[in-house]
Image (cartoon, grey):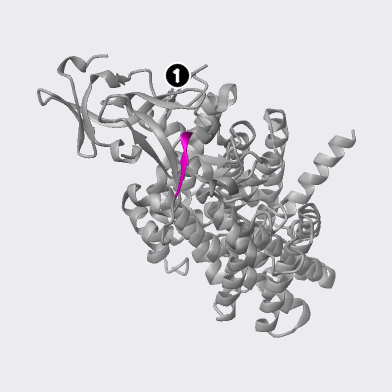
Amino acid sequence: MRVTDLLGVPVRTESGESLGHVHDIRGELGARSLRVTGLVVGRLGLLERLGLGAPRTPLRVRTRDVLPWSQVVRADRCGVVVRSQAKGD
Amino acid sequence: MKNLLQVALGILAAIGGFVDIGDLVFNVQAGAAFGYRLLWVVVIGVVGIIVYSEMCGRVAAVAGRPVFDAVRERLGFSVGLSALIASEIVNFMTLAAEVGGLAIGLQLLSGLPFHLLALVAALALGLVIWVLPFEWIERLFGYMGLCLLVFAVAAIKLHPDWSAVADGFVPSSPPGDRLVYAYFVIGLLGAAMTPYEVYFYSSGAVEEGWTPKDLGLNRANALIGYGLGGFLSLSLMIMAGALFLPNGIEPELLGTVALGAQVPLGTIGLLLALLGICFAVGGAAIDTCFSGAYNLAQFFGWEWGKNRTHAEAPRFTLAWLVLIVLALGVTMTGIDPVMLTEYAVIFSVVALPLTYLPILLVANDRAYMGRYVNGRVANAFGVVYLLVILVVAVTAIPLMLLTNQGQG
Amino acid sequence: MSKEIDLGLGVLDHQLVDSEGRRCGKVDDLELEGVADGRPAVAAILVGASAWRGRGVLGRLAARLARGRMTRVPWQEVADVEATLKLRRKASELRLGRGDDRARRIVEWIPGAR
């Protein structure tokens, strides 16, 4: 799977509630790895979508609100399904 | 002290490069059509390009990114590619107009046939870029471009009505055709805010390895370079307003522009004007051509740089070579460079939002810019000009069509 | 020491630079692994025209026109991520920058290309 397969796909909970779309994918950069730790989902303001208003971090992140990958049930290019208690991070 | 001198020389060399064929055509036509009434637009345009180029220079110095890196990173591949295609088309039209303009200038100086001189012009430009180190190119074209100051002298010697000139800096309701007036407003803004010079500047800054220490230099370059370029543009309009408008002369040829210096200053004026035009347009052609190559290389990730050897950045080298050859091809078809310039300026204004917005975004991005991020003043200007650019981009083509390119 | 980064904003479409400081392409896409079994990570960087197929309509068109080739660079080859992605080895060792290598053969015909 490619990262572009997941960017922009719709996200919903197991119970069918829509949480928005995948705006970005959060990762953790290690010495020799880049692990995926979560998804940036949902109702971002226009500014955040344009990449502004980002918290002051050494690298590029859009926002501090991230859906941890542990909440993801299924992810493919059709969409992402997360556990129902996942919202409201 | 020596550093200061170097900086001053650099800026001086750059001034010659800030007037191109778009400025020559639109400022003179505007003066011939509306006298001094559009001087205020030049000021707005010059401030706009100062804002844009200062931001690009700051992004280059702090974030290490030239314009098209920022475009692709911010807009993504698809939208970024559209921005690239639009910019390349505009760059190419501008380059063809400049090669043609240079050929006309050479023709006025030598009397040799146009097609031969177009070939000479393209070969000369290609050879100069291939052989000369870039510093020498900048100095040569920059200093010789200063001959254009003859137009400032000419404007003064024509004894314009200075109170009318002063009035021209205040926007006023135009006599006669409002649509043509609006078209010239768009055209003048487009001629002042030509993006290729900014792409070139931003790439140069990255190549020179600018750091935040160079931000003062960045501001000086932007302010003084474009400021004095604006001074030349104003001179052109005042000269045209004083000479062409009262005599009903419509400057559709570059030769007519040079006439503006000959009438008050005689043969020496004519010679300086023609030399100035040739070097300013030739220098602009080089910048445009490189800009086209920079944009491609920066979007696709190729090696680039005017200070690399040609073999070190081969796709970049091939890009500018191909651009010159194609531009020569267009010029050889005999298309009128002045008309091509008008189209190029209008289209460049339509494409401008696509490359301005990513830079404004990056300039506001604290993660890239740290404490050099846009302050409130910079953002006030930045956002105001974004709106100006959007309005201009949307109205440009309708106005061009409605007014039949300013003919009314 | 680990750092947080967003793949779309901070990695995708960024410039690749090899160990000698040579520019050798952009991150055109990223290959993920372990998505199905809950331990997702970036496996490799995908560089080349063929990788544009996932980048929208224009991307697919461009991929076809450019007769896409693609190079896969395992993520372990990445030394650091800042404004650009710095790689551990030379471009030639990673099969990157081949477009420049091909173009160089043409440019070197002209005297003075050094």
Which image quadrant is residue A17 in? top left
Coordinates of residue A74 in the picture (x, y in percent): 20, 29
Establish if B375 lies above or below B155: above
User: Furthest-left residue in view?
Assistant: A15
Coordinates of residue B371 in the picture (x, y in percent): 58, 21
Q: Inspect this view and state whether residue B71 appears.
A: yes
Position of the N terminus of chain B, as image quadrant, is top right
Residue under label 1? A55
Which image quadrant is residue A15 in? top left
Q: Chain of mark 1?
A: A
Helix, strand or loop under label 1 = loop
Q: Residue at x 49, y 55 (%)?
A: B87
Asked if the magenta segment contains residue C72, the reply would be yes
Coordinates of residue B18 in the picture (x, y in percent): 68, 53
Q: Nearer the viewer, residue B404 or B354?
A: B354
In the rendered structure, the answer to whether residue A37 lies left or right of residue B159 reads left
Crowding at dot 1, Cα within 10 Å, few <14 / some 14-19 / many 20+, comes out as some
In the rendered structure, the answer to whether residue B404 lies left or right of residue B276 reads left
Under mark 1, the amino acid is: Pro
Position of the C terminus of chain B, as image quadrant, is bottom left
Q: Residue at x 68, y 54 (%)?
A: B312
Coordinates of residue B268 in the picture (x, y in percent): 84, 69
Q: Residue at x 27, y 18 (%)?
A: A70
User: Furthest-bottom residue in view?
Assistant: B113
Q: Nearer the viewer, residue A30 or A16?
A: A30
Look at the magenta stretch and give its main secondary structure: strand
Q: Inspect this view and state whether residue B38 appears.
A: no
Q: Which residues are magenta?
A: C71-75
In the rendered structure, the answer to whether residue B205 lies left or right of residue A31 reads right
